[in-house]
Amino acid sequence: MSFSQDANKLFDGAIVDYHKTDNVDATIQNPYKVQTIENVLYLKNWIDTVQWHLEDIIRNPEIDPVEALAIKRRIDKSNQDRTDLVERIDSYFLEKYSNVKVKPTAVINTESPAWAIDRLSILALKIYHMKQEVKRNDVDKAHIDACQKKLDILLEQREDLSSAIDQLLQDIENGDRYMKVYKQMKMYNDPNLNPILYGKK
């Protein structure tokens, strides 16, 4: 199988594993060996899945404001964890292709492989939950039909994105494209860069 096929299968499995408890506080049971790319991908999707449900919870119009703030802080941390994992995935590819002879005509891509894979992980979540909407028996046919159309588009989008990722990796391996990794350099979590935080010193 291609890298994207393996990733899609892994993401789908992680989402199913999460929904065995459907609990944002459930302990992750990562089935892959530590220090493998599979372990990192599973962890990445698990974090995405938990955050997906936290985003649902925080939109409850009757949520207690104190609880909402706690969840918002949790989402902020989750976003940082996701970014860190994307950078780890890109580091994996940098190492994997470190000995590739880059052609003089090689060009850089608009995004790194890992950020495309990040989108693939989110797509897996959209597909899973749209399938759940299609299966509902407490809504009318119009709702089912509308969700089925959205699901068809999501599935096509995953096919296209998967193909693009595999082509990108092939181009990097062939030396036709090269990759750079720019750290996100997020400022709002850094007490030395966020004026609200360093103003309190």
Image: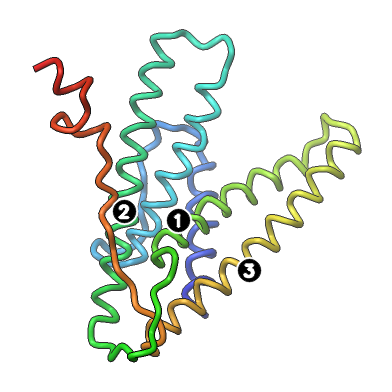
Judge the density around disc 3: few (<14), some (14-19), many (≥20) Cα neighbours within 10 Å. few
**At which x and y percent is residue 21?**
50, 37
Q: Amino acid at mark 2?
A: Leu
**At which x and y percent is residue 22?**
52, 35
**At which x and y percent is residue 34?**
25, 61
Residue at left offset 47%, top offset 30%: 54
Residue at left offset 52%, top offset 59%: 120
**At which x and y percent is residue 135?**
77, 43
Q: Give the Cα separation between the discs numbered 1 and 3.
A: 15 Å
Task: Give the label on residue 85, or none.
Answer: 2
Q: Give the Cα separation between the discs numbered 2 and 3.
A: 23 Å
Say whether marks 1 and 3 touch (CB < 8 Å).
Answer: no
Judge the density around disc 1: few (<14), some (14-19), many (≥20) Cα neighbours within 10 Å. some
Quarter of the image holding residue 111?
Answer: bottom left
Judge the density around disc 2: few (<14), some (14-19), many (≥20) Cα neighbours within 10 Å. many
Say whether marks 2 and 3 touch (CB < 8 Å).
Answer: no
Residue at the outermost left position: 201
Quadrant of the rendering where the C terminus is positioned? top left
Residue hosting label 1: 118
